[in-house]
Amino acid sequence: MITSTSNKQVKNVTKLRTKGKERRSQKLFVAEGIRMVLETPLQNLKQIFLSETFLSDEAHVAETERYLGADLSQIREMEMLNISGDAVKIEVMAVSDEVMKQMSDTVTPQGILAVIRMPEYTLQDVLCGDETHLLILENVQDPGNLGTMFRTGEGAGVSGLILSRDTVDVFMPKVIRSTMGAIFRVPFVIAEDLQETLAEVQAAGVKLYAAHLRGEKMYDDYDYTGATGFLIGNEGNGLTDETADQADVYIRIPMGGKLESLNAAMAAGILMYEVNRQRRSK
């Protein structure tokens, strides 16, 4: 069992949890909590850390053993348990509660934490011909908003997300928690040059709609049964003119009272579910 916070594995988890540059360099990120860890595809798992308290919970241990297909009964006495299989190599380590608290991003850790290999997708993975349904984000900064968009996108049936490079880091712990596992099921692409990527998307036959205050028609006046992509901008400033100008159409969501706009995640959810509604009605 690891009992020292100076252990090199523990130090690396802390670096991955707190430094985006380190995550990008190692192509690894950290996820916490039993639901998040057990929803991770096995081939993406690199390491799992289990606390003393977690290991004393028979139900949680049994659930983890079923998931891993391994016996954890001796893990307290071992430095590391290696689990190997087809395309799978996972290191499992026990740590003291104090060490888990040091590694964790939450106030009350659940006692299970994983280091995970980043999923990698290409633009072709999110393009699905006439069935394409994209959410395209420019400079969205709130981790909760981004996580909610992933989760709502999964529910609405998006084919994928495209994120500008200046959007909040999708692999930071707060975003990962907010996705509730959707991060592993919804393909996404981080665009180094958003305008160039949008041109490629349009060349593939996708019609782009920008949620914009200058939109003349309401969002539900259009037909989204063909290949569709929605552009959503920064929470405070909206889309840049450069990105908005690439849209085929500006659309509006009706506002009552004195409101000018909705929360970015709420607006995205309304638009994505309109696509879902129309396609179910075909």
Image (cartoon, rainbow, N blue to C red):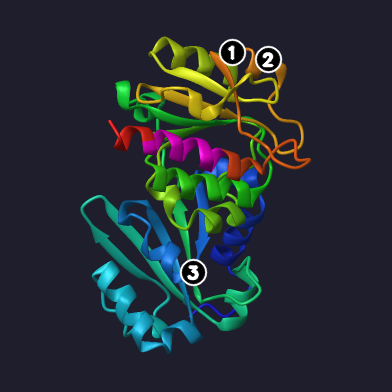
Q: Quadrant of residue 123?
A: top left
**From where the camera sits, is residue 158 visible?**
no
Please give the name of the residue rendered at 52% of the width and 76% of the height, measured from the top-left corner: 110
C-alpha span from label 1 to label 3 = 41 Å
Establish if 106 lies above or below 14: below
Q: Nearer the viewer, residue 278 or 131?
A: 278
Q: What residue lies at 31% left-to-right and 21% top-to-bottom?
A: 130
- Cβ atoms under marks 2 and 1 closer than 8 Å: yes
Magenta stretch: give its range. Answer: 268-277
Please tell me whether the stretch drawn in magenta is mainly helix, strand or loop.
Answer: helix
Residue 233 lies, in percent from the top left, at: 65, 31
Q: Which residue is mark 3?
A: 33
Relative side of 159 to 115, left or right: left
Mark toward the viewer: 3 or 2? 2
Name, please, the residue furthest toward the left.
Answer: 86
Q: Quadrant of the C terminus?
A: top left
CA gap between label 3 and label 2 equals 40 Å
- Circle 2 is placed at which residue position? 242
Q: Quadrant of residue 187?
A: top left
Q: Residue furthest top?
A: 203
Q: Earlier in the sequence, mark 1 or mark 3?
A: 3
The answer to whether marks 1 and 3 mark residues whose Cβ atoms lie closer than 8 Å is no
Secondary structure type for disc 3: loop
Q: Residue 270: within the magenta? A: yes
Q: Residue at x 35, y 21 (%)?
A: 226
Tag 2, which secondary structure? Answer: helix
Rendering coords of residue 109 (x, y %): 57, 75
Q: Residues within 10 Å of mark 1 (few under 14, many from 20)?
A: some
Camera sees residue 157: yes
According to the image, label 1 marks what residue?
246
